[in-house]
Amino acid sequence: MARQFLRTMLTPGVRAAQQRYYPRGYPELGDEHADEPLGPDELAFVAARDSFYMATVTENGWPYLQHRGGPKGFLVATSRQQLAFADYGGNRQLISTGSIEATRRANLFLMDYGARRRLKILGTAEVLDARDHPGLVEVTAPPAGHAATPERIVRIDVHAFDWNCPQHIPERFTRAQVDAITRPLQQRIRELERELAN
C-alpha cells in the first residue's frame, strides 16, 4: 500500500514543495495497480508493538497526536484491512475520540527503535461504545489482561501504509529487552563471584 500512501499524501502543495527544493519530485502514481492489504510483515510488526502514536484532526483543523501503550498485542489486526484497540478511561479530555467522530481521519505511527523500523498507517477510524460491542471487547482484550474495563473500541479501516527507511532512527531498547540481553551476563557474574568467594 505504499503507492496508495503516496497517492494520498502527495497533494498539490506537497508536489509544489518537491519542485521548489528538488530538481525532480516523485513521479505521478496512477491507479493501474491496486495496493495489497496488510501483509505478513505488517501484521507481525503490529502484533509485536507495545506502543504507537496516533494522530487525528480536530474539527477546527488542528492535528492532535497521542501516545498509546499497552502489552504487546493490544493493537489487534481484526483483518488484513482493519485494526482495533480497546480504549480505557483516562483524563476524560476525549480529544482523539471527538476528533475521530467528527473527521474520521487517523494516522498511526508504529516504531521499533531496537530494530530501527517504523510503519505509518493511514486509516478511517470510528469509535464504538464498548458496552454495545462485547465481541470486539473480547478480541481487543490485552493478552496479559487489563485491570480496567474498556469504555470504547477504536476501529481503523486501513487506507494505506508505508515503511520508512531506518536512517536517523536512534537505537533504543526497553527495560525488558535490556534485561533479556544482560541476563546471561548477570548469571555469569554471579557464577564468578561464587567462584571467587570459594
Image: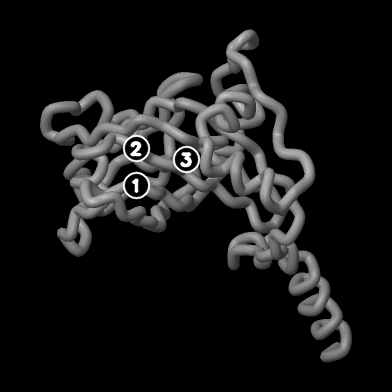
Q: Report the Cα–Cα distance between label 1 and label 3.
A: 22 Å
Q: Quadrant of the C terminus?
A: bottom right
State the mark number for residue 56: 1
Circle 2 residue: 105
Circle 3 residue: 73
Crowd around label 2: few <14 · some 14–19 · many ≥20 (10 Å): some
Residue 35 position in % (x across, y down): 59, 17
- Give the residue type that dot 1 points to: Thr
Question: What residue lies at 20% left-to-right and 39% top-to-bottom?
Answer: 102
Residue 173 position in % (x across, y down): 65, 64
Counting residues from the start of the chain, the first of labels 1 and 2 encountered is: 1
Return the residue nearer the eye: 45 or 169. 169
Residue 54 position in % (x across, y down): 41, 49
- Give the residue type that dot 2 points to: Arg
Do we see residue 154 in this rendering?
yes
Say what secondary structure mark 1 lies in: strand
Name the outermost residue toward the left.
131
Question: What residue lies at 45% left-to-right and 20% top-to-bottom?
Answer: 79
Q: Is 165 rendered above or below residue 5?
A: below
Question: Of circles 3 and 2, which is in front?
Answer: 2
Q: Report the Cα–Cα distance between label 3 and label 2.
A: 23 Å
Counting residues from the start of the chain, the first of labels 3 and 2 encountered is: 3
State the mark number for residue 104: none
**Quarter holding residue 105:** top left
- Dots 1, 2 in contact, CB < 8 A: yes
- Give the residue type that dot 3 points to: Gly
Q: Report the Cα–Cα distance between label 1 and label 2.
A: 6 Å
